[in-house]
Image: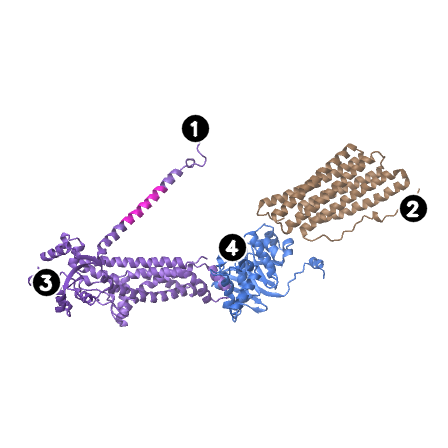
Chain colours: A purple, B brown, C blue
Amino acid sequence: MTKQTHPLARATLPGLEARYRAEIRFKYIGLVAVAFSLVFLFFLIGGIAIKGVGAFFKTDVQLEITKELIAEHGSDSYTLLRETLLYNLPEAKGRLGHKDAYKMIAAGADDELEKVMANLGETSDIFKVWLPVSDTIDMAYKADLAEDMLGTLTASQQKWLQSWADNGRLRMSFNWNFLTKGDSRDPERAGIGGAFLGSVMSLLVCLILSFIVGIFAAIYLEEFAPKNKLTAFLEVNINNLATVPSIIFGLLGLAVFLNLFGLPRSSAIVGGMVLSLMTLPTIIITSRVSLQAVPPSIREAALGLGASQIQAVFHHVLPLAIPGMLTGTILGMARALGETAPLLMIGMVAFIVDPPLGFMDPATALPVQVFLWSDSPERAFAEKTSGAILVLLVFLLFMNLTAILLRKKLEKKW
Amino acid sequence: MPQQHIVKAYDKELAALDQLIADMARQVRVLLTESVTSLVRNDDVLAQSVIKSDKEIDALQVAIDKQATMLLALRQPMAADLRTIIASLRVSNDLERMGDYAKNISKRTITLSKIPMMASAARSVERMSMLACAMIDDVLEAWLQRDIELALKVIHQDEEVDQLHTSLFREILTYMMEDPRNITACTHLMFISKNIERVGDHATNIAEQLYFAVKGKAFNEGHVSLDEASAIVAEQGSDK
Amino acid sequence: MSILKKVEIGEELVLNKKIIAKNVCVSYGELQVLHNVNLEISSNRVTALIGPSGCGKTTFLRCLNRMNDLIPSCRLKGSITLDGFDIYDKSVDVEVLRRRVGMVFQKPNPFPKSIYENVAYGPRIHGLAKDKAALDVAVEKSLRRAGLWDEVKDRLDAPGTSLSGGQQQRLCIARAIAIEPEIILMDEPCSALDPIATARIEELIHELKERYTIIIVTHSMQQAARVSDYTAFFHLGDLVEKGETATIFTNPKDERTEAYITGRIG
């Protein structure tokens, strides 16, 4: 007895089997593409993460200080430091030996020592203090004393490093300096704090300027402007401006803000203004789209009740368009955060040590800092470049998450 | 009606209603003719078949009512369609009464067959029934064609039927006064004459319903009834 | 005069003409959509505007509260007067007009705010309530008149959009009457609703006409027949016939009207 095929089975429709197979193929191609991109992303980010995570940690060495040393050099932390080093490294002999010894410790360690000294308190014969090592020792220790890293050290330094490591006098601690301090010639003292602050301040200026001008421009163009050739021309131009290379805005900023208005070079305010020029078209476009997405029935309902055009827009249309506008703004900010070229044009490429205190103070920005460090020869700066990229990425991620959360929270159903 | 409805089924249903009315009217005409024939020829068998056939007419009335009710419920008719359907309901009532009159004539025919009949009276009755049948034909034609002119003609035709009835009434009175033995037969004949006169009146009603359906207002040209039989008083004392 | 006599004569009983449209011609740019419309609207009656799609009835309705001003290419010739005053006069403030002539739209469009806020918005922007207490009174009055109070009195803070379709439309009606208009324009108010909700709105219209003058555009002839006192039939931009509803639907004068209402054209 042959089994009868069900009248609704696939085989009854010609070509259906082939179509399903084609669809499955398509699905798998899509999956492969996604997997490919994920792998790529993984390697990219993974590579940077591996290279940069070390920047967040530093190596400290435990040195012994005797009461006598304190008594002798207590007032001068610089000399105290040197003497302490020599005390801890008795093998260091001669001028070269001493130089090698001094190079074992970080450049700003004397300030560290002074801070530690203030907190010593109890009297004892010997104190143990943890002080940061120099960049070369730090890199060598992080590489687990690998051959290529050791090559940057002298023979004595290698020996001392080895003995410190063997005696457990080295430890890894979190490198707060990286996050708080400004740029420096010495890798161990260099941090992105200044650049971070500069970025935040520039973005703040950018946000205030472009958000306010952009929102109101979008409201005017969408709701109030008459639909004629002039407004059509404006719309085309705004769309084009959104695609203009950002360096052009830098040139504009240079010519107008620096030369014409005479604002201080490399300041956060100029950076912010240039970035806002760049972000404005994007914000206007996304705001207009958000406004257009509000159903016209809401406007009609408000107008039918005798509300004026302005009342209808501000009481009803705008609250519904705000989620979209905010999302567009934050995404625009995220783009501005990562822009380097225009900031270079207005001079934020200078070597700034102190984090900016005011908007008129010279500052630098995160991407610019990455650019500057990537130029430096020291191995430690290579690590710091990757670390700075990680900070930048985290910042971007944070901004995008904020955009998503804000949108979810403010979205109203109509 | 000028155009077709967009929904063709609606037109079909209205046409079915008209068809039912046409069938009923034709049936009534046949019955009337046959009943008078049976009277003139004294044919009891024919008279019996007429009495039986009246049931078909009643069935048709039920069918018309059903169709009209269905149209009212399902089609939400407006204006002329609505008036036509309402008129159809009334027309079916008129036709049913006409069928009943034909049946009644046949019943009396059976009774009269046992009694001799006056020839001239029979002829008058025949003439009346022919007129009535002509009215039925005309009014049916008017209905199917929605012809107001023809309807008005039918309304006027009733005058002649009324006049015939009046004169027949007088004639029968004289017969009764001549010979009291004629009274039974003459009484029946009186009723038969009245029945045919009523058939004419109902045909007029149908014409008026048609007027209402087409024009949208009631026919009130005030047609005068020429049936003066109700005012006739026989003179006392015989004119021998 | 007895009713029978009136019915016989077929008098058009247009009482107290609230709105008079004379020779109204409306065009969108080159395209003329209304030709010489002459129509009088009686106060405290329901007037229905019927006709096939694109016949201009909605356009005419929207002229009455100047919602067509929102369309830049729309031009009106002729006059429309409210209580004798031209509503297209230069000194007319459109917001004042729309306070006196309210509108309910085809698809219920409550604001995405609470039920209370929906109804309170109109009185608020027109300064009709002195304080919160007065506003509460106004909101309750409107919701009662719209037949919605009992259903929502416990959840005035719930969003307007959480109501069912029929309730939303009644909310829109409450919103419209909260500003105490004299005239309510309704643009196919029941076309998005189920039969029960429709019936409730029709009942509401019947109650409302004691206080307000109502003009309703509807695609459903049966609805026009049920709900209105007067009906005006539009066809291809012309006002073909107007009169008492009962007459229009039992014995219309114009054959175009007859053809439309019996389902032969449109």
Same chain assignment for discs 1 and 4 = no
Badge 4: chain ID: C
What type is the residue that disc 3 sits on?
Lys
Who's the residue at 83% across and 43% down the image? B168
What type is the residue that disc 1 sits on?
Thr
Instruction: Please provide the residue range marked out in magenta.
Output: A23-39
Residue C40 sits in quarter: bottom right
Q: Which residue is mark 1?
A: A2
Looking at the rendered image, the disc whose residue lies closer to the viewer, 2 or 4, is: 4
CB contact under 8 Å: marks 2 and 1: no
Badge 3: chain ID: A
Looking at the rendered image, the disc whose residue lies closer to the viewer, 3 or 1, is: 3
What is the number of the mark on residue A99?
3
Q: Position of residue C143 (x, y in %)?
A: 55, 61
Looking at the rendered image, the disc whose residue lies closer to the viewer, 3 or 2, is: 3
Sequence order check: which comes first, mark 3 or mark 1?
Answer: 1
Q: Which residue is mark 2?
A: B236
Residue C64 in view here: no
What is the number of the mark on residue C164?
4
Looking at the rendered image, the disc whose residue lies closer to the viewer, 1 or 4, is: 4
